[in-house]
Image: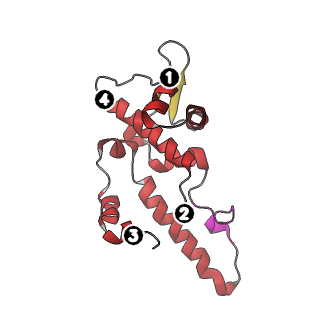
Amino acid sequence: MRISARADYAVRAAVFLARASLDEHASGERMSGERIASEQGIPASFLEGILSALRKAGIVESRRGAGGGYRLASPADEISVADVIRAVEGPLVFVRDERPSELEYPAADSDLVTLWVALRASVRRVLDDTSLEQLATGELPAEVRALADDPSSWISGR
């Protein structure tokens, strides 16, 4: 599985907005796209398209003009990382542009479908179970921490 720059930037922007929503001094404040881009090191023109997709998906809301900008449309604990990625990329796991559960293989290769469905389930488990609030506060789910704490998770090429 590959996480695109678009998905990475979308998650980073959403976590930035989650932190702002949790900050008692900034709660409810809208953040300009320029500020998000600057503080996150995201190309502003690229970020505008991402924020537009997040707005269309109902993850962020925006306002133009004085006091305008972006903020989360729901509480940060109600928005998962998977929600953000799906908003900008579509389904989490595709095989040859098809959902794993819709693939058809010869009977001898049917376990490949099972493998791809299991991959999708494991990706969903991590991304659906991790909220923007958890990322913003550093309180990742125990299952995610356990996976990352396994030294073999950090070995490249495996």
Assign a secondary structure to mark 2: loop
Assign a secondary structure to mark 1: strand
Measure the alpha-carbon separation of dots 4 and 3.
36 Å
Dot 3 amino acid type: Ile
Is residue 20 shown above or below 112? above
Measure the alpha-carbon separation of dots 1 and 4.
17 Å
Dot 2 amino acid type: Met
Would you name the residue on which mark 3 appears? 155
Dot 4 amino acid type: Asp
Q: Disc 4 or disc 3, which is closer to the eye?
A: 3
Q: Earlier in the sequence, mark 2 or mark 4?
A: 2
Q: For label 1, count other residues whose C-alpha is less than 10 Å away and answer few (under 14), some (14-19) or many (20+).
A: some
Q: Which residues are magenta?
A: 93-103
Would you name the residue on which mark 2 appears? 1
Q: Earlier in the sequence, mark 4 or mark 3?
A: 4
Q: Earlier in the sequence, mark 3 or mark 2?
A: 2
The image quadrant that residue 156 belongs to is bottom left
Q: Position of residue 77 (x, y in %)?
A: 37, 41
Does residue 101 belong to the magenta stretch?
Answer: yes
Q: Residue at x 42, y 32 (%)?
A: 39
Numbered mark located on residue 69 in the image = 1
Numbered mark located on residue 20 in the image = none
Point out the image quarter for the C terminus: bottom left
Numbered mark located on residue 23 in the image = 4
